Amino acid sequence: MVVAVSIIILVLAFIFSMLGLGGAMLYIPVFKWFGYNFKTVAIPTGLLLNGVTALSAAIFYLKAKMVDIKGSIPMIITSFIGAPLGAYMTKFVPVRTLIILFAISMVFAGGRMLLTSQRAEPERMMETKKRMILTGIAGFFIGFIAGLLGVGGGFLFVPILMAIGYPTKKAAATSAFVVIFSSFSGFAGHVAEGHFNISLMVLTLIAVIIGSQIGAKVMKEKMKARWIKQMFGIVLLGVAVKLVIGLFH
């Protein structure tokens, strides 16, 4: 079973690294569908893989000079603070509620991406000071949500970066960089609570490293901005529907 899960994770890492996401929003449902405990295994393992996928892709994007390092600092700091707080709160929230919140957040992000996929790329960014304040505030809340739901927050970082003027590919690359920190911070919060499965982690870690490197290369050289947005939206909506249906079976 672990081998089958790892193969699926490799394919997902390939896809999500192109979108600037860690992939936890699909890693977690996959673990749940294969029978792993949602709170104690799926969420913490998803966060770890999320961070590794993002890290692997971000290394490629940094070398290609696609990441706005300076602009990402407020989000990194505040999301790093918010993520472990969210992770701590998982023990107080019922699993059913977590899944519903997870699905709602994906519908919001996915729907927005599909609606904006045909828009022209922005020509200018929001003024620097205002941009730093907004991303700093957003980073804390996204980090908290990421830790609570077991995701890296990329599915929320990308739309926010695009809303303040980042071109699609730069938003995806910068998001991958930011997600590293919120993911590992959230994961640390779960490990402190004793949530982990070593054998599952090792095999799936190998899978995400391979998949994310291939995906990052394909994104830089082959993908068009509107394709990235459309893939992003379709994947998120599909998973949200699957999760909600699962609640009633």
Image (spheres, rainbow, N blue to C red):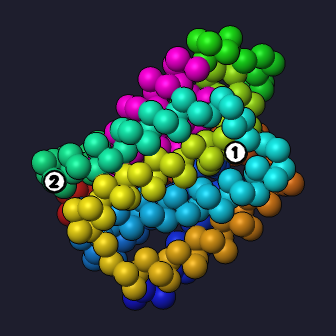
Q: How many numbered discs, if any?
A: 2
At horizontal 67% and vertical 74% (from top left) the residue drawn is 210
At horizontal 26% and vertical 68% (from top left) the residue drawn is 195
Q: Nearer the viewer, residue 104 or 217?
A: 217
- The local secondary structure at tag 2 comes to helix
Residue 53 relative to residue 79: left or right: right
- Is residue 241 visible in the rendered structure shown here? no
Q: Which residue is mark 2?
A: 91
Q: Residues within 10 Å of mark 2 (few under 14, many from 20)?
A: some
- The local secondary structure at tag 1 comes to helix
Q: Residue furthest right?
A: 221
In the rendered image, the quadrant that contains the N terminus is: bottom left
Point out the stretch of residues depicted in magenta: 132-161
Circles 2 and 1 in contact, beta carbons < 8 Å: no
Could you tell me the amino acid type at mark 2?
Lys
Residue 158 higher or lower than 191, as above or below: above
Q: Residues within 10 Å of mark 1 (few under 14, many from 20)?
A: many
x, y percentage for residue 241? 38, 50
Residue 91 higher or lower than 153, as above or below: below
Residue 1 higher or lower than 126, as above or below: below
Nearest to N terminus: mark 2 or mark 1 = 2
Could you tell me the amino acid type at mark 1?
Ala
Q: CA distance from mark 2 to mark 1?
A: 32 Å
Q: Which residue is mark 1?
A: 173
x, y percentage for residue 191? 30, 64
